Image (cartoon, helix red, strand yellow):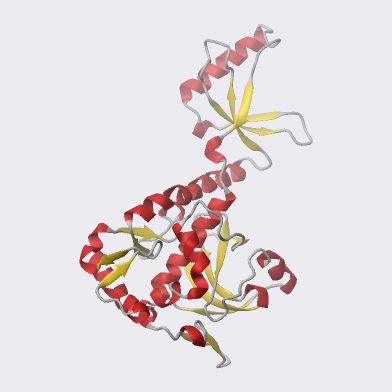
Amino acid sequence: MEKIAYAKLLSKSLNVATGESNVYRCPLCLAPFSVQDADLLTWDHYPPQSVGGRDRDIVLVCQDCHRQWSPTDAELARLMRREEFDRLYPGMEPVILRIPDEPYVKGLRHREAIGVRGRPIRLVGRPEHNVQEATQRLTEFLNRATSEGKWNGLKITVSSDPQLIYSTQRIERSFLKAAYLAAFDCLGYPYVLSPALNTLRQQMREPDVAHLTDHTVIFSPQLPGFDREILLAYVHTPEPVTGLAVFFLGYNLARWQVTFLLLPAHPEMPKYGQLDQSLRKAGGMGFVSFERSRELTTDAEVTLVDQNDKEWPIYSHDTK
């Protein structure tokens, strides 16, 4: 879809929510742009392309927000690299080995997998992450040191590999942003401008500040060959997790991710910080899933109906 066409479509949603005409607001910071200026904006994938985000799952955001969120979204690539390491070297830790005082190998970095728990120290080189010349020179040096008995006094430093260290908080916030954009793309401005989402909107404006925590649950190993899918669902049981759940299934990570967003109909839910505990205690969740459709973006009175004809309103009566 062209940028101006997308902005024009969503401007109708903004008109329903606020009465503004011919205006598109960045969903992250809510800065206003005329529909004709949509080319100043940029497409943002939810989730990011680094974990398999698709070109059909995109939202227009402003350049400033795109830059501000880039370091947080980039954390997912580190997580993917660490998951691949854990798959190849189970029970080991990623390190960088250096011998700083020997001229022949000074400055060389050799990435290793190290295991020390319950056994003698075990080092395994990671060929795909090491420059061949560095590996060759380091091997030559160590073989020579062994044959000549020059281990005494040899200084070897081992440090954590920064390419495989990631922030769990940033990972969670990246999925929170992806869930927020998925909800915006489906429900539009009546949803994201709801008073119930005040704190969530603040988190979208300030990705480096912890306004919300413990909103993402990780579960079930990815199924081989499972198609990538984003599923929106109204979760009604157990009560502490009542909210709008966004499932990210089949992406390039080891496990599925589900992020819980607030519902205007239940602004006090979900109880962040109790999600895992509540789900474990209940043994599962009851929910009504629904298809994402941009036709819903101009509807401020969305109500879902389950197979038993029970109605589940997205918005409370006060916010209609």
Please give left or right for residue 49 compared with residue 226 in the image.
Answer: left
Residue drawn at (57%, 75%), measured in percent from left and top? 243
Q: Looking at the image, how many numbered discs can be counted on the residues?
A: 0
Residue found at the very far left of the displayed protein: 36
**Relative to residue 109, is residue 1 depicted above or below?**
below
x, y (%) of residue 31? 34, 63
Residue drawn at (51%, 59%), measured in percent from left and top? 175
x, y (%) of residue 250? 51, 62
x, y (%) of residue 54? 39, 61
Q: Report the front residue among 226 and 305.
A: 305
Q: Quadrant of the N terminus?
A: bottom left
Residue drawn at (66%, 78%), measured in percent from left and top? 239
Residue found at the very far right of the displayed protein: 118
Which quadrant of the view contains residue 298? bottom left
Q: Quadrant of the C terminus?
A: bottom left
Residue found at the very far top of the displayed protein: 148
x, y (%) of residue 260? 56, 68
Q: Is residue 143 visible to the viewer in this orientation of the structure?
A: yes
**Relative to residue 225, is residue 92 depicted above or below?**
above
Q: Is residue 225 visible to the viewer in this orientation of the structure?
A: no
Which quadrant of the view contains residue 191? bottom left
Which quadrant of the view contains residue 98? top right
Q: Report the front residue among 65 and 302.
A: 65
